[in-house]
Amino acid sequence: MTKSAWFAPDVTTALVPKDDGQGVMISAIQSLEFGFGMQICKEDLKKINEKRKGEKYVDESAAMAKRGTAEKRELRSSPFILEFDYVANNDGYWSYDHMVLQVEDYMDCLKVLAPQFDYFFLFDHTCGHDKH
């Protein structure tokens, strides 16, 4: 098992399981305007996908590594809350490549659904190595 664990702001942490089993992690966006995540209806997804058609990701190497192509695929659901499985030995663990693609996916959504706003993002990649 890894000696790393997620810590709360008061430096407490949950007990780490004793097996290398499977788990689920979430990468989500929270904002003052939209709250936690953002639901997107089918009609809006269609508008977003029309705008994305034929576009490539800015970080083409990340797209190639995670999706096998630099071309943007059609979004089938909101990219504002993504759940993913991870397994033992960090295989499938969330990485920079995943994050940068998710950011570009939700930016595409915001440019279509809320173009009147300017955006500023802060990332909380809380990491619990030994102590803060």
Image: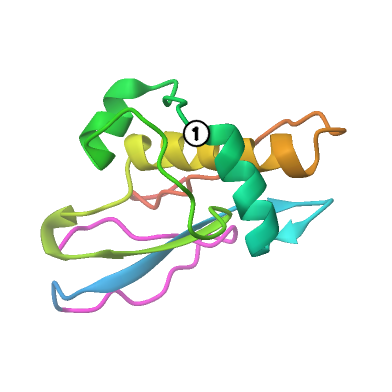
Residue 78, compared with residue 102, is above or below; it is: below
Q: Does residue 132 appear in the picture of this structure?
A: yes
Q: Kindly report the secondary structure that dominates the magenta region of the rendered protein.
A: loop
Query: In this figure, which colouring scheme has been used for the structure?
Result: rainbow
The residue under the point 80% across, 33% down is 115
- Structural crowding at the residue carrying mark 1, measured as other residues with C-alpha within 10 Å and reported as few (<14), some (14–19) or many (≥20): few
Is 9 in the magenta? yes
The residue under the point 44% across, 20% down is 58
In the figure, residue 123 lies in which quadrant? top right
Residue 16, compared with residue 3, is above or below; it is: below
In the figure, residue 83 lies in which quadrant? bottom left
Q: In the image, is 132 to the left or to the right of 98?
A: right
Q: In the image, is 29 to the left or to the right of 56?
A: right
Residue located beneath label 1 in the image: 53
Task: Magenta stretch: give its range.
Answer: 1-18
Is 55 in the magenta? no
Front in this rendered view, residue 23 or 59 = 59
The residue under the point 53% across, 40% down is 105
Front in this rendered view, residue 122 or 106 = 106
* Residue 73 x/y as whole percent: 40, 42
* Residue 122 x/y as whole percent: 64, 36
Count of numbered circles on the image: 1
Q: In the image, is 36 to the left or to the right of 7?
A: right
In the figure, residue 34 lies in which quadrant? bottom right
